[in-house]
Amino acid sequence: MLRVAVLVAVAAMTGGCGSLLNAMIPANSRSNADAPEVVCVSFPDAPREVAPLAIAAVVAPIIAGIVVDQVAKGLEEEAKRYKASYSGRASSYLLKVTPASSGAAAKVELVQKRMRIDRYHGNVSKEHGCPRDLSDALRTTRATQIESERAMSFEAEMELGKNGEAIFITPTVFELKRTKSKVSAFRNKVDVNVQVTLTTFVKDDKATKQADIAQVDFPIGKIELADSAKPPAVRHLRSGWYFVPLSPGSVSGSMPQFIGPLNLTITVKEADDFGDVIGQGAKTVSENKAKIVEGLLKALGLQSSNKK
């Protein structure tokens, strides 16, 4: 009965196996910063506006099976900590069109040339929101605190083709101070991918429809989490050309007009490969449950005598 009691105690302890593993596997001090958080996406050049997630023979195998299940579940929970994603949105217009007049050719230009996403981790940011939305007085008094909570920044530039028919995007800034995902202290590196999605609306003879302009992935790569780490070069990740499904030449009149309501979504994904290793461990435990239970019972001298 003492051996059964040992199994019961182990089963009880492994009930919170995910939390236990999280505590046992050391994380990089710059990782696992998941909450509280604020994610801000903006067009930095746009005018700022203030904004208004026998008993022993029968019971022992059952308890042993519970122990194995809890270990597998704990490993699965721990594996999930090593991946995280977050995103934000902003809206504007895509193009400003100045019709031709007095011999001057029509002019087509981007309304917004820069896009940016910042992630803040801390109570000050959670209380007050994105710095861009704060009053001038509050931005001044809280500037240092908010900046200290900035965990990640990504910025990119859009460039318009000569005829206004296509755009390409060039990442210019990426800085990572703290990750939302857990990063193993054994590796201290995290894989980062940034995805930029641009959509607009176009009219045809029947209706107005949403149209995708671009969905671009910028694989930033493995980023080291260390005091001495320098921000990586990202300009070489420039996208190709993306067609703009608008007709600037159809704009009439004499006054400049904004066309193409623009929705911008930026998503950041973080992942530590160590999570995959743990996930594979969970799969192995589940697939070999019978053998593990048998070994556990044998080690405790509780092997069933009815085994065929």
Image (spheres, grey):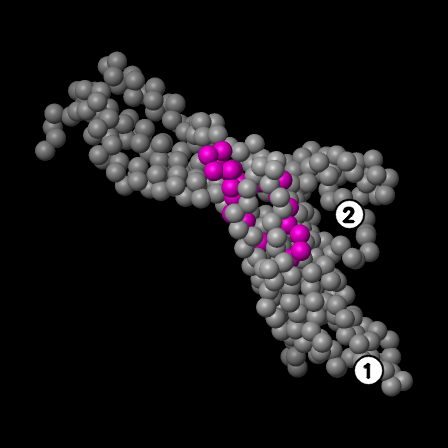
Q: Is 144 located above or below residue 235 in the figure?
A: above
Q: In the rendered image, which quarter is residue 90 located in? A: bottom right
Q: Residue at x 39, y 41 (%)?
A: 277
Mark 1 neighbour density, 10 Å: few (under 14) some (14–19) many (20 or more): few
Residues 183 and 54: in front is 183
Numbered disc total: 2
Bin the neighbour count of mark 2 within 10 Å (Cα to Cα): few under 14, some 14-19, many 20 and up: some
6 is higher (above) or lower (below) than 143: above
Three-letter amino acid code of the residue under disc 2: Arg
Residue 234 visible in image: yes
Say whether residue 88 is magenta.
no
The residue at 44%/27% (across/down) is 24
Residue at the outermost left position? 308
Q: Which residues are magenta?
A: 171-194
Q: Residue at x 61, y 55 (%)?
A: 234
Q: Nearer the viewer, mark 1 or mark 2?
A: 1
Instruction: Please name whichever residue, 67 or 117, is drawn nearer the observer in this view of the structure.
Output: 117
At x 84%, y 39%, the residue is 140
Decide if residue 269 is on the left or right side of residue 135.
Answer: left
Q: Is residue 6 left or right of residue 196?
A: left
Residue closest to the far right: 102
Q: Quick one: SS at disc 1?
A: loop
Tell me the kind of residue under disc 1.
Ala
Residue most extreme to the bottom: 103
Q: In terms of secondary structure, where does tag 2 sit?
A: helix
Q: Nearer the viewer, residue 148 or 231?
A: 231
Q: Name the side, left or right, on which 121 lies relative to 50.
A: left
Residue 289 in the image: state x and y as whole percent: 26, 36
Measured from the top left, where is residue 265 in percent x and y?
A: 63, 57
Q: Which residue is mark 2?
A: 132
